[in-house]
């Protein structure tokens, strides 16, 4: 398999504290890779660094064979990387339609953009119904659908999702994860970060357990759940409520 | 009453309109980069000096030059002074804008000395016209109409163009907008250009009303406009426009309606109202959503 995203020895520091230490991750074309770990494990730092929001202190990030480590953050989406950040971040005062349109900022094929918007509005009737309302008025689940759709409007090669189930009820989480699977079926590679370990394990082809900024364990759902070290690696695993 | 009422209202609207445009110019930059740009004063003063320097040329030439000078000045200050500070805390940027403001002001004193210089860019508009049976000053009427047209044009730009959408997005959540591909430099440069265009128009109309320019020409109007943006709700463009308009209208009406011995204290009454508004609405009349950071 060819690696779409290749991360080597990635180290990220906030002041003198290491958020990530020597992280190696490969994501191949068409895969779903998940990163699980407790709060503060460095999951958000990882995605933020790939997207260019946070600078790296060391290491390399290669996307489709190109070094993207020092790319300004508005360029990563142009390379084909879309990030759905933690906390959703709809543009609350802009309408649902305007949010979707902004997702296509990097595209100039207006008729195609319009068709894509129609497709998402068909897939999510609630978004169609509320298309001219400010996105801030949508419920949490609706906002999550909107920001995933918005990210897909850029037609990314790699979709990165940061805690997509956070704060959502179980049925909504099901819908979000259905949407993630569908997206992969359409050929988009996915890197998802979760505290919700069970869910992220189930959806992913491969999972890395991140804790204290270090990859502790890697494998598939089967190998990891059978691994006696799994809980220790996850550390504060608590019984993470599924949704 | 009717014949006195209309000119007073046109007068009030023309002052309100100028404050609204100035407050909008400040608000546009504030909303995208949280910079309270004190140097907006010089974005008004410098084009007014351009009008003075080119006063022997046809009106079209001097006004075009004034607009061009304002835009270039805005882009240069953005590039030289504010871009290196981008993302730094708003207080530091505010101080930097004081520095830019002082620097340009001193430069003007150096180049032109600090005495007032006569300008009359819109001499063609001297005189008055009949409106609903009242005589109305043509310049003031033009000011009202120009302000209205610009407000509508700006609204259309922000609401219906791609650039405008990007600017509104950046105003709501700058980092998220950049993640979606909105180019920070372009959005900020656009904000500065729009701000400068508004400032140049204010320079033309305001200098036509006062008839002279001096190094602190823009400052007098910008200080009031700052107050107006605070009343309206910092970071909210509608609020800035309404706040500017209200302050202008109220101060003009006070000038017209206060008993003559109280008129010198007009500003005191204006600021009394400002204090009252802020006591009851500390966030301003239209609080900005973007300022309550969402985590």
Image (cartoon, grey):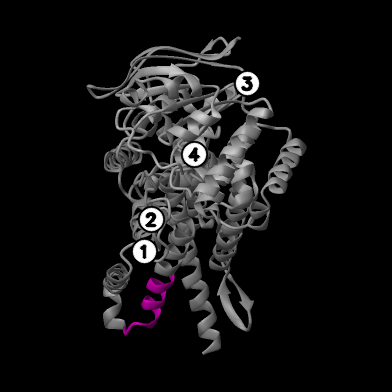
What is the chain identity of the residue bearing mark 4?
A: A
Q: In the image, which disc is placed on residue A194?
A: none
The segment highlighted magenta reads: B249-259
Q: Main secondary structure of the magenta part?
A: helix
Q: Which residue is mark 2?
A: B234
User: In the image, B265: left or right of A64?
Assistant: left
Residue B293 in percent (x, y) is at 37, 48
Q: Which residue is mark 4?
A: A164
Q: Residue at x 66, y 49 (%)?
A: A124
Q: Are marks 1 and 2 in contact (CB under 8 Å)?
A: yes
Q: Which residue is mark 3?
A: A30
Q: Are marks 4 and 2 in contact (CB under 8 Å)?
A: no
Q: Are marks 1 and 3 in contact (CB under 8 Å)?
A: no
What is the chain identity of the residue bearing mark 2?
A: B
Give the CA distance from mark 3 to mark 2: 46 Å
**N-terminal label among 3 and 4:** 3
Membership of B254 in magenta stretch:
yes
Can residue B265 be seen in the rendering of this structure? yes
Closer to us: mark 4 or mark 2? 4
What is the chain identity of the residue bearing mark 3?
A: A
Q: Which residue is mark 1?
A: B284
Give the CA distance from mark 4 to mark 2: 33 Å
- Which secondary structure, mark 1? loop
Give the CA distance from mark 1 to mark 3: 51 Å
Residue B270 in percent (x, y) is at 32, 71
The answer to whether dots 1 and 4 both sit on one chain is no
- Which secondary structure, mark 4? loop
What is the chain identity of the residue bearing mark 1?
A: B
């Amino acid at each position: 398999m060819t690696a779409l995203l290749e991360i080597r020895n990635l180290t990220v520091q906030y002041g003198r504290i290491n958020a990530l230490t020597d992280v190696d991750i490969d994501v191949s074309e068409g895969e779903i890779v998940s990163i699980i770990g407790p709060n503060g494990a460095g999951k958000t730092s990882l995605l933020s660094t790939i997207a260019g929001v946070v600078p790296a202190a060391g290491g390399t990030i290669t996307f489709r064979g190109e070094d993207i480590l020092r790319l300004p953050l508005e360029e990563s989406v142009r390379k084909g990387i879309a990030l759905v950040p933690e906390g959703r971040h709809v543009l609350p005062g802009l309408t649902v339609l305007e949010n979707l349109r902004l997702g296509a900022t990097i595209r100039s094929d207006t008729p195609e953009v319009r068709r894509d918007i129609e497709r998402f509005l068909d897939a999510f009737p609630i978004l169609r119904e509320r298309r001219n309302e400010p996105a801030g008025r949508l419920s949490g689940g609706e906002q999550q659908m909107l920001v995933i759709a918005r990210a897909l409007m850029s037609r990314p090669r790699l979709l990165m999702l940061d805690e997509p189930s956070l704060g959502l009820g179980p049925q909504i989480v099901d819908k979000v994860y259905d949407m993630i699977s569908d997206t992969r079926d359409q050929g988009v590679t996915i890197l998802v970060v979760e505290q919700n370990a069970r869910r992220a394990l189930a959806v992913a082809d491969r999972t890395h357990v991140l804790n204290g900024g270090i990859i502790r364990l890697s494998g598939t759902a089967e190998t990891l759940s059978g691994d006696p070290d799994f809980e220790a690696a996850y550390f504060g695993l608590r019984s993470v409520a599924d949704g | 009453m009717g014949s006195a009422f209309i000119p007073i209202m046109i007068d009030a609207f023309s002052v309100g309109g100028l404050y609204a445009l100035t407050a909008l110019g400040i608000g546009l930059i504030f909303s995208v980069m949280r910079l309270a740009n004190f140097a907006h004063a010089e974005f008004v003063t410098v084009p007014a000096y351009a009008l003075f320097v080119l006063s022997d040329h046809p009106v079209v030439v001097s006004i075009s030059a004034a607009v061009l000078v304002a835009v270039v000045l805005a882009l240069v200050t953005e590039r030289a002074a504010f871009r290196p500070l981008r993302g730094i805390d708003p207080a530091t940027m505010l101080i930097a804008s004081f520095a830019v403001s002082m620097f340009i002001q001193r430069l003007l004193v150096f180049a032109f000395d600090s005495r007032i210089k006569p300008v009359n860019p819109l001499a063609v508009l001297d005189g008055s016209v009949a409106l609903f049976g009242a005589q109305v000053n043509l310049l003031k009427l033009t000011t009202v109409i120009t302000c209205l047209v610009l407000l509508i044009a700006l609204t259309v730009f922000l609401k219906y163009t791609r650039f405008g959408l990007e600017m509104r997005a950046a105003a709501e959540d700058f980092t998220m907008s950049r993640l979606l591909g909105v180019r920070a430099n372009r959005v900020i440069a656009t904000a500065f250009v729009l701000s400068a265009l508004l400032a140049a128009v204010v320079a033309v109309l305001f200098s036509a009303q006062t008839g002279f320019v001096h190094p602190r020409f823009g400052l007098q109007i910008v200080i009031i406009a700052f107050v107006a943006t605070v009343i309206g709700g910092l970071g909210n463009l509608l609020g800035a426009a309404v706040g500017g308009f209200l302050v202008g209208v109220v101060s003009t009406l006070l000038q017209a309606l206060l008993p003559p011995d109280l008129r010198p204290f007009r500003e005191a009454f204006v600021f009394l109202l400002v204090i009252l508004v802020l006591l009851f609405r500390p966030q301003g009349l239209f609080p900005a959503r973007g300022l309550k950071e969402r985590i």
